[in-house]
Image (tube, rainbow, N blue to C red):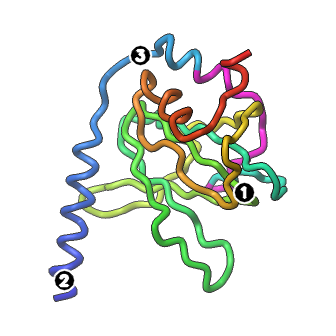
Amino acid sequence: MRKLMFRLFVIIMVSLSLAACSDGSKSTVDEQAIHALCDGDNYKADLFDVILNKNGVRGDPELFFIHNISQTPVWLNKAATKTGEASAGWASLIAVNRWSALAVTGNFHLTCSGMDNGRLKTLDCSQFIKVCDVAQVRYEMKPSDSYWVAESQLPKSFLSRIEKRGIILQSIHK
């Protein structure tokens, strides 16, 4: 039974990875608009993970954009940083040349993994994703905890998806 469940898990992971294929696009006007919003540096790469909100300040949530720059889909996972801490429900697949956004309160450790010959493998995040901190953000309803704002979006729909979630990207609306 355990073997069957594991095989089912691997099949689902491979299927999701294959479904997350690239649209093959180069840098677009939409991507230039996304990059123009990147302003801060409140994150750091630390071996195989990325620490978002490295200063750990709790207050207004920080908004981070994550771009898959590799040629393979990448799973983003919340790393357990304390003994006994669970990270269930945080995994998010980001397809090739897609963007995700994460609102973060306090320190948030992300790890990256991908499929390699049917097995999940830990990846060096710095080789697969780029992260940027968005400095001028206003929340219609201030969240009390971290959450995914947008996941695996094409550049053309990324910013509108964020704004539909009640986040005002102030440098767009000056």
Point 16% across, 88% down: residue = 1
Question: Which residue, given by chain and number where applicable, does mark 2 sit on?
Answer: 3
Q: Position of residue 2 (x, y in %)?
A: 21, 87
The answer to which of marks 2 and 1 sits earlier in the sequence is 2
Amino acid type, mark 1? Thr
85 or 60, nearer to the observer: 60
Residue 41 at x, y percent in the picture? 77, 38
Q: Alpha-carbon distance for marks 2 and 1? A: 38 Å
> Which label's residue is closer to the chain start, 3 or 2?
2
Q: Name the residue beneath numbered marker 1.
A: 105
Question: Is disc 1 placed on a helix, strand or loop?
Answer: loop
Name which residue type carries label 3.
Answer: Lys
Inspect this view and state whether residue 48 appears.
no
> In the displayed structure, does residue 68 sit left or right of residue 11?
right
Of residues 17 and 45, the one drawn nearer to the viewer in this rendering: 17
Q: Position of residue 98 (x, y in %)?
A: 43, 33
Q: CA distance from mark 3 to mark 1?
A: 33 Å
**Magenta stretch containing residue 64, yes or no?**
no
Residue 93 horizontal side relative to residue 108, left or right? left
Q: Which mark is residue 26?
A: 3
Q: Secondary structure at mark 2?
A: helix
Q: Residues within 10 Å of mark 3 (few under 14, many from 20)?
A: few
Read off the magenta span: 34-49
- Which amino acid type corresponds to the residue marked 2 in the rendered image? Lys
Above/below status of 162 relative to 31: below
Q: Residue at x 47, y 15 (%)?
A: 27
Decide if residue 90 is in sight here: yes
Camera-nearest residue between 170 and 151: 170
Q: Earlier in the sequence, mark 3 or mark 1?
A: 3
